[in-house]
Amino acid sequence: MTVRDNSIEPSQKRKKLQKIGVFTSGGDAPGMNAAVRAVTRAALANKLKVVGIRRGYQGMIEGDFIPLKSNDVSGILQLGGTMLKTARSAEFRTPEGREKAYKQLKKAEIDAVVVIGGDGSFTGALVMSQEYDFPFIGIPGTIDNDIYGTDYTIGYDTALNTVVQAVDKIKDTARSHGRIFFVEVMGREAGLLALNSGIACGAEVILIPEAKGDHDQLNKFLEKGYKSKETSGIIMVAEGDEAGGAIQIAERVRKEHPDLDVRVSILGHIQRGGSPTAKDRVNATKMGVAAVDALLDDQKSIMIGLDNEKIVHVPFNKAVKLNHSIDTNLMDIQKLLNT
Ligand SMILES: Nc1ncnc2c1ncn2[C@@H]1O[C@H](COP(=O)(O)OP(=O)(O)OP(=O)(O)O)[C@@H](O)[C@H]1O
Ligand SMILES: O=P(O)(O)OC[C@H]1O[C@](O)(CO)[C@@H](O)[C@@H]1O
Ligand SMILES: [Mg+2]
């Protein structure tokens, strides 16, 4: 980003942009703070005023706004969670809620907003921008990495490493006792975290919502293990798997193979916490600066994405409607190594 000199050639459109808002929405993700810092400092460097909107769309509806200066975003780069807090707002899903939010933005003289969140957050921004022609720019922040048009979402790399560290520990006890562990990882509708952590940990089977027929692989593994008495293993289960979560699948396996020693470990919200990895910090910083750049270029209703390390602009309607595809090659590799 080149810092713009507002005293030179101020265009009609550029003149309008004086104050921007920034907020985090949906599930928190490590690296969101790094993105807030980058947006704030890039905007300030371009002589824009910055307002932090607290608690996602709910805070927007309630006018929970705080001015952000450079010092306010000091020391947050390495912190997990989000200093602006986040929320899932049912009220914003209603036209009345969005009207209140729009009025609050107008009252605070906010000209444009950067939203850091997942597909749901971008859908909300798209709906509101269609109703009120208000400029939103999105930064993908979700541990699910389930957004079309970007290789990475902020928080995914940290969550992946958290899962890998946890499963490595579970493997120690699984092997020592000869037990089969069903490890459930987050991803209501997305199996990317389960697939990649499963590969990184050498899981025997990976069950994800995007793959049909992966339960055949589970049945084969159980039969083989049952006969050979080689009964330790890790089965990674995405919480959104078609057969239910790890508890339901383990229940069925216990009934069908009563001699196997089966345990369940649900990793839960530890996957969303912790200090962001260097990769998440760098991506968040690049995307934050790119979001301000896009606003200065009068862009709206687009998400900042990363395609092979390069910044790309993805229209919101594509980012939320198309699916982030699963790497089928990775699934084939996993099966090949576990035949
Ligand atoms: N169709 C919609 N219309 C209006 N607002 C919406 C819509 N979908 C989502 N939102 C708003 O966006 C918020 C965040 O969405 P959601 O809870 O799906 O999380 P997300 O942004 O997808 O992040 P993550 O999946 O990582 O938790 C919702 O609580 C709601 O306020
Ligand atoms: O913390 P909550 O609101 O229960 O949300 C859990 C969901 O959020 C995510 O962690 C994404 O943020 C999903 O993987 C998970 O299904
Ligand atoms: Mg989502």
Image (cartoon, rainbow, N blue to C red):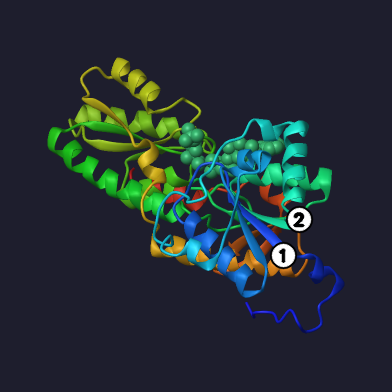
Residue positioned 40% across, 65% down in the render:
278
Q: Which mark is residue 151?
A: none
Residue positioned 38% across, 28% down in the render:
246
Q: Residue 135 carries which label?
A: 2
Which callout, 1 or 2, points at the residue further toward the start of the chain?
Answer: 2
Residue positioned 70% across, 62% down in the render:
19
What residue type is disc 2 on?
Answer: Pro
On the rendered image, what quadrant is the N terminus found in? bottom right
> Percent position (x, y) of residue 271?
38, 44
Q: Is residue 90 above or below residue 276?
A: above
Q: In which quarter of the image is residue 222?
A: top left
Within 10 angstroms of label 2, few (less than 14), some, or many (20 or more) residues?
Answer: many
Q: Residue 295 carries which label?
A: 1
Within 10 angstroms of label 1, few (less than 14), some, or many (20 or more) residues?
Answer: many
Do we see residue 253 in this rendering? yes
Toward the viewer: 306 or 197? 306
In the image, taking residue 317 as reference, residue 132 lies left or right, namely right
Q: Determine whether the residue tagged by mark 1 lies in a helix, strand or loop.
A: helix
What residue type is disc 1 on?
Answer: Leu
> Percent position (x, y) of residue 231?
21, 32
> Percent position (x, y) of residue 62?
65, 39
Identify the residue at the far right of this view. 12
> Percent position (x, y) of residue 321?
70, 44
Between the C-alphas of marks 1 and 2, the distance is 8 Å
